[in-house]
Image: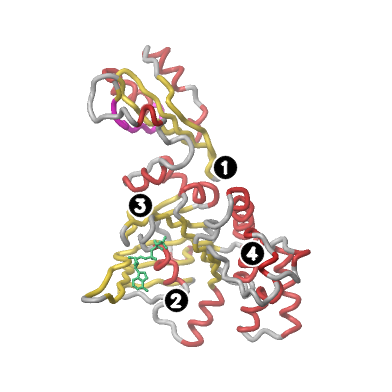
Amino acid sequence: MTGRAEDAAIIFEGLGKSFPKAGGRVTALEGIDLTVPAGSITGIIGRSGAGKSTLLRMVNGLERPTEGRVTVTGQDVGQARGPALRAIRRNVGMIFQHFNLLSSRTVRGNIALPLQIAGTPGGQIRARVDQLIDQVGLGPLADRYPAELSGGQKQRVGIARALATGPQVLLSDEATSALDPETTQTVLELLGRINRDLGLTILLITHEMAVLRDIATHMAVIEAGRIVESGPTYDIFTKPTHPTTRSFLSGVTGTTLPAFVAGRLQDGPPGDQVIRVTFAGTHATDPMLARLATELGISANILGGAIEEIGTQPFGNLLISVPADQGDRARAFLETHGLTTEVLGHVR
Ligand SMILES: Nc1ncnc2c1ncn2[C@@H]1O[C@H](COP(=O)(O)OP(=O)(O)OP(=O)(O)O)[C@@H](O)[C@H]1O
């Protein structure tokens, strides 16, 4: 992801972070170059221990880089101290997997907290809290305590609290990981609405590709402290280049080989070649397999697949097998017509 500095909400440049450990140091992040476009929802995906939380914590100064720098709306976070750091923190809200609400305070009290810390006059706090409660749809629950709320309601409180000081950037640390799928959707929809209505930039970390598919305009894949692939979500879903990205993608709909095929997959011929065909944009709804049969006389077996949407653009994944000696012709034909193909292996 590149872009002009003035269009960027967050810029990581040559960022590195290591921690002391017995007998040396452990490197958590290395050579991170990433631009988060202003107004985007940018997602970082990676496995446990890849460095996601450390990366996020650099953005609000909870961690400082050991190399390189991170700037938020032009401010160098690593160099900021005292009032400058507090100003950055008011401009960068954060929400958490386990909500981090104060159990002794009501919904209203939790949301008011950052305003009280910022020294906002009491009268203004009340009006602002009412506005935030309305914004996240918590109206009737304003005087409840966290223990009386569902997970989704608690996360709405977390979101309202994060928005209290009017930040330009919202950080989300696995905000939906503790929620069931239905509640996850409602929270993602709320984040999408806030992004659109307030023009807020959201940087989120997740280990779930489906979250990125549903909400992120841009994404980056992080592995062992390095970014291995980044760009618009649609491009990465339709043309992944790194094996780690492919492996994450195999977990979302339509890209998983049925077990009876996966168990028999081998590297070389003979038999049938198993191909993943990715349809993007206007090609997503073309009858290409029918044309493969009528124009080339090659009949494909369909093993799995789905057509979905990323943003408003259609995108399909189809797993097919064709006779191994016809594989190259079939793939060339599909590629000529704007589809992307990948050989997954061969089966007898
Ligand atoms: N304060 C710390 N002291 C020492 N090592 C740390 C510290 N914080 C993180 N690390 C190490 O840095 C690496 C990256 O950790 P981080 O928590 O950022 O990964 P993550 O991708 O967020 O993982 P998870 O999804 O499990 O939270 C790990 O090897 C971790 O042990």
Q: Quadrant of the N terminus?
A: bottom left
Which badge, 2 or 3, comes first in the chain's sequence?
2
Tell me: is circle 1 under 8 Å from ligand 1.
Answer: no
Toward the right, the furthest residue is: 140
Q: Is residue 150 left or right of residue 181?
A: right
* In this view, 274 is above or below 212: above
Give the number of the mark in front: 3 or 4. Answer: 4
In the rendering, at what x and y percent does residue 48 appear? Answer: 38, 58
Q: Between marks 1 and 2, how big is the CA–CA gap?
A: 36 Å
Amino acid residing under circle 2:
Leu
Residue stretch in magenta = 337-346
Which numbered tag is attached to residue 312?
A: 1
Would you name the residue on which mark 3 appears? 229
Give the number of the mark in front: 4 or 1. Answer: 4
Amino acid residing under circle 3:
Glu
Q: Is residue 343 magenta?
A: yes
Q: Between marks 3 and 4, how big is the CA–CA gap?
A: 33 Å
